[in-house]
Amino acid sequence: MSNSATNNLLESEPTKLKSKNRILAGLSIGALGIVFGDIGTSPLYAFREGFIGHGPENVTTDSVFGLISVFFWTLVVIIGVKYTFFILRADNRGEGGIFALLSLLPTSKEGSVFKLPTFLFVMGIAGAALLYADGLITPAISVLSALEGLKVLMPKTNGHSTAMFAEGFIVLIALGVLLALFVIQRKGTSFIGRLFGPVMVVWFAVLGLLGIVSTCQTPEVLHALNPMHIPSVVGASLASTVTVLGAAMLCISGGEALYADLGHFGRKPIMWAWYGIAMPGLVLNYLGQGALLLRDHEALANPFYGLVPTWGLVPMVILSTAAAIIASQAIITGMFSLTHSAILMGFLPRLRVVHTSDHGSQVYVPTINSIALVLVALIVITFRSSDKLSHAYGLSVAGGMAIVTVLYAILMRRQRRWGIIRFTVFLGIFLTLDLLFVGTNAFKIPSGGWLTLVIAASIVFLMLTWVRGRKYMTDRYSRQTLGYDHLLNSLQTHPVPRVAGTAVFLTPQSTGVPPTLLHHLKHNKVLHEQVVIMSVQSTSVPVVDPEDQVTIEELRDGFWTLTARHGFLQSADVPRMLRIACDLGLETTEGTTTFYLGRTIVTPRGRSPMPGFQKRLFCALAQISSNNPLYFSIPPGRMVELGIQVDI
C-alpha cells in the first residue's frame, strides 16, 4: 500500500469517529427535549411538596437534608440504575414502551399478546392507561407550576398576596397556553421539535447555575447527599414518610419517557443526556433549593423562584413556561404514539391517524387531541394550582413504573432465562421501592389521587370492552366462514358474469372467504376477472421487514389470497402492499383496481355474554372504528363499502 493511501486510511478513522460523536451528541441534545422534558420541570414543584403542610415551621436542617438525600438517591436508583441499566435493554427491535414490552412477553406457543395469561394482559393495559392519566395531568401541572412564578411579581395587599385574583389570573393564562398548545398539534411537531433540545440545554444549564450559586452560599448542604440522612424523614412518622416519598415520586415524574422514547434516540444518547446534562442540573438545583431554605425558611412558599434574583424573575417565568410547554408537547406526542400503537395492536378502535412527518414516526390523532384538550382544561379549572394537582400526579407515575418493573422481570424470566435468584433479587429491590411509592401515594387518593384512578380505570374498561367485543365478533365470523374450495366449486356449478379489472376484498381474518365478498356476490351477482382476498394483520413487532410484509398465493379461476403484515408502529398502507404483491407475480394496475371494505353495523340485540351497558359501549366504539379508507390509505375514489349488520 502506498504512503498516501496509508495516510488517507489513518485520516479516515478519526473522521469517522468525529462524525459518530457528532451524531451521538445531536441525538443526546434531542433527547433532552423529548425524553427529559417532563422530569426536567419537576424542580418547579417537587421540592416544595416534600414538607408537611408547606409551612416554614416544618423546615429544619434534618428535614432539608433528608429530603435532598431521598431525591438524590431516588434519581440514582430508579432512573440511573433501574431504567438506564435494565429496562432500556428490553427493546423490541429497537423500540421501547409499554406495548413494546407487552409484545415481547408471549412465548412461541402463545404467539399473540391476546393469548397471554389474563393477569399479564390486564397489567399491560393498566400500564398504558396510567400513561394516559400521566399524559392528561402533566400539561396541567407543568404549565400551572411555571406560571405560578407570576405570584411573586403581583402586588401585595395588607402584607398578603391577592391570592384569589392571582390564582384566577394564572388559571386563565394557563388555559390560553394549553389551548394554543393543543390547537397547533394538527401542524405536527417537527418544527417545534427542532427547538426542543437547545431550549432544554439552556433550561438545565440555568437549573444547575442557580443551584451552584445558592450552594456556594451554604456549602454545608452538600452533606445531604449522604444516604444516612434518609431515616430522619422516612420512617420518622407516617405523615413525614407519605409526604417525602410522594414528593420523591414527583422528582422522577416523566422518567418512564426514557423507555417510551427508546426507539427515537437509542440507549446511548439517552444515557449520555441523563448523566451528562439532565441529572447534574436536577441535583444541583435541588441542592440549591435546600441551601436557600436553610438560609430563609420563608422561601418555602416557592423555593424554585426564590433562587432567582428579582431582575431575572420575568425571564425565568418565560423560560419555565417554555420548558413546561416542551414537557407538555412531549407527553401529548407520546399519547398520540401510544394511541397509534394501541389501534394497530387491536386495543382501541380505528381512529383517524394523521402522519405529520415523512418518516412516519410523528403522528397526530384528532379525536384524542380534542378529548385531551377538554379533559386537561377541566383538570386545570378543578384543581387551579400545581400544589393541589400534585396529589393526583404521583400515583400514575408510581403505578406505571411498578407495572413496568413486574413485566420486565417476567420477560427476563420467560424469554431471557433469568434464574430464580436473579429474578427474586431484581423484584425484591426495585418492586419493593416501587410499591413503597405506590403505597405512600395511595394516601393521596382522597385529596386528588382519585383523578388518576378514574382516568386509568375508564381507559382499562374501554380497552377491555373493545378487546372482548372484537373477540366475540371474530369468533362469530369464524363459525360462519366459508372455505375457498366450497366457494370456487359453487362458482363452477353456478357461474356468474365476470367484469374486467381487479377486486380487492379486505378482511382481518387469515383464512376463509370474507363476508364482504359473499355479501357482494349475493346482491350484485357479478365478480371481477381477478379477485384478491387481502388479509391485513398487525404483528407483535414494531416494524415488519419489507420482504416479510406480503405473502401471496394463487388459487384458481382468477382468485388470489394475499396476506399483508405490518408492525404496530407501521401503517396499514394497502395500496403499497398491493404494489409489493405485483412484484411477486400478481398482475394488476392501480386504475383498474377496486377495494371493497365491510362497514359493520353492530347492534346490542344479540345473545353475547357481555352486560347490556358494555354492549352499548362496544356498539358506540364500533361506529367510530369503521373500516375507513384513510386508515388503509385507500384513495376514496377506488373504494366501495358494503354494510353488514351484526347483533352481539
Image (tube, grey):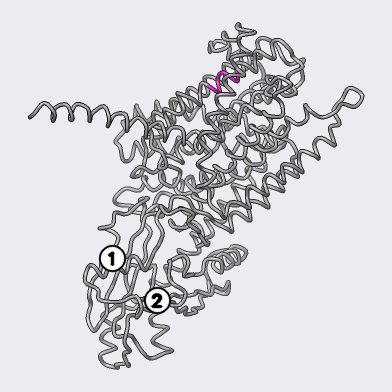
Q: Indicate the secondary structure of the residue bearing disc 2.
A: strand
Q: Residue at x 36, y 40 (%)?
A: 91
Residue that label 2 marks: 595
Q: Quadrant of residue 508?
A: bottom left
Q: Quadrant of residue 602?
A: bottom right
Mark 2 or mark 1: which is in front?
1
Q: Are marks 2 and 1 in contact (CB under 8 Å)?
A: no
Find the distance from the CA under tag 2 to the CA under tag 1. 16 Å
Q: From what the image shows, is residue 139 above or below residue 11?
A: below
Q: Residue at x 38, y 91 (%)?
A: 525
Q: Decide which of 109, 203 is in the foreground and name it.
A: 203
On the rendered image, what quadrant is the N terminus found in? top left
Q: Amino acid at mark 2?
A: Phe
Q: Residue at x 38, y 34 (%)?
A: 267
Q: Is residue 81 magenta?
A: no
Q: Decide which of 497, 180 is in the foreground and name it.
A: 180
Q: From what the image shows, is residue 299 above or below residue 317?
A: above
Magenta region: 281-286
Q: Decide which of 173, 394 is in the foreground and name it.
A: 173
Residue that label 1 marks: 580
